[in-house]
Image (spheres, rainbow, N blue to C red):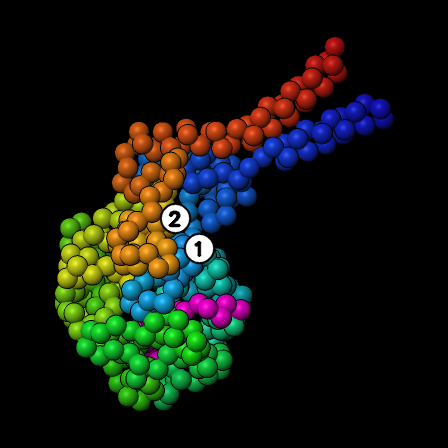
Amino acid sequence: MQLQNTISIASLLAATLLLSFSTALKEGQTCAADRFCDSGLHCETCVANGNVRPRCTRIQPIIPTSKVKGLPFNRYTWLTTHNSFAMMGEKSATGSIILAPTNQQDSITSQLNNGVRGLMLDMYDGQQPAVNVLKEIQAFLESNPSEIITIFIEDYVTSSNGLTKVFNAAGLRKYWFPVTKMPKNGGDWPTVDDMVKNNQRLVVFTSKSAKEASEGIAYEWRYVVENQYGNGGMVAGSCPNRAESSAMNTTTRSLVLMNYFPDNPDLSQACKQNSAPLMSMTDTCHSAADNRWPNFITVDFYKRSDGGGAPQATDVTNGKLVCGCGNIDSCRQGMAFGECELPEAGVAPAPGAGAAAKETASSAGLGKRAPFLQGWRMAVLILGSLHFSLWF
């Protein structure tokens, strides 16, 4: 009994010391599980990119309006998920596993909580599944009165006023941004402040042109230029428009949407695709769109990357749009365009930095996690001393 008490006390002391000295790990640092990473990060490897070391990688962009408010809606970039509802392991209404391809790892609610603000949804006749998804959006808007969400509908609904009925059933009509306020000739949208003030915080586009007149739901390509989706939109150095869209350099459309995902969702390759190639495509599409940065960056498996990923691409593009800087984190309310605040020393290297720079940044982070390592050493010494005394 005395031996058991001694072991228990020593173990408790070691655990207490470990917890008291521990600190959350930063982006790029080696991790064992999500819970050890700082807020907005999770722990994963990217074998497709030759990186087998588990590291803390980003899953959340900076909400741009937390840095600079009051700009037109088309002066921001919003992280967007393709087939947002197609969640891994999701079950149908009957309880069976859905066998269709999955494009995301978590629920609509989780995506929104992680900073996703654009959702691509396929909709069909048969209200209840769509209503369930839309109710998640309604709950988020209700709980977050300053947030704006955009929905892009791949529209297969044929019933009369079918979309209207679904949105009404989900309680979303009260947030509706009206078609009449959307600029028709490439002008600026209302400011995000006005959209919030008027509680017109849900922007909805459909792929069916007739529904703009019949149901008041905006036909996407009257307002948006969009590049090719699937494999055709992932060719390096090329950013062609999809067939339904006007050419990418059509400036009578105020919004630019950039797709970057393959024909068939691939979880294992997504971490590679959502890293340097994604960043490169934002530059390519910027040139193709008459030097306009994308307002929506759309990916599969938005949480997968080899570092900053789609959240970082969103932050970089927001920096260019909002204040003319390399990252939204450098933007401040009231600053002159291009008057950038430089990041503090020791932050993670910029996108595209070489392996040496990344390793240097990771090594520099050792100072920040020194208390964590000291805690581990202390725990090992205590348990080791106990083992030694019991052995002899």
Which quarter of the image is occupied by the C terminus? top right
**Residue 388, x across and y down, in percent:** 70, 14
Under circle 2, the secondary element is: loop
Badge 2 crowding class, 10 Å Cα cut-off, few under 14, some 14 to 19, many 20 or more, is many
Residue that appears at 46% across and 39% down: 26
Marks 1 & 2, CB-CB < 8 Å contact: yes
User: Is residue 125 visible in the rendered structure shown here?
Assistant: no
Determine whether, in the image, residue 2 is placed left or right of residue 154: right
Q: Which residue is mark 2?
A: 304
Which quarter of the image is occupied by the N terminus? top right
Residue that appears at 33% across and 43% down: 342
**Residue 113, x across and y down, in percent:** 48, 60
Q: Nearer the viewer, residue 338 or 352?
A: 338
**Mark earlier in primary sequence (1, 2):** 1
Determine whether, in the image, residue 209 is placed left or right of residue 249: right
Q: Nearer the viewer, residue 4 or 306?
A: 306
- What's the amino acid at mark 2? Arg
Residue that appears at 33% across and 67% down: 71
**Residue 242, x across and y down, in percent:** 19, 66
Q: Tell me how far mark 1 sits from mark 2, CA to CA.
A: 9 Å
**Residue 371, x across and y down, in percent:** 56, 30
| Total labels drawn | 2
Q: Over which residues does the magenta segment extend?
A: 143-157
User: For the view shown, which residue lies furthest in the right direction?
Assistant: 1
User: Is residue 214 visible in the rendered structure shown here?
Assistant: yes
Query: Where residue 388 is drawn, which disc sits there?
Result: none
Q: Which residue is mark 1?
A: 105
Residue 23 within the magenta-colored segment of the rendering:
no
- What's the amino acid at mark 1? Gln
Residue that appears at 31% across and 69% down: 72
Residue 145 within the magenta-colored segment of the rendering:
yes
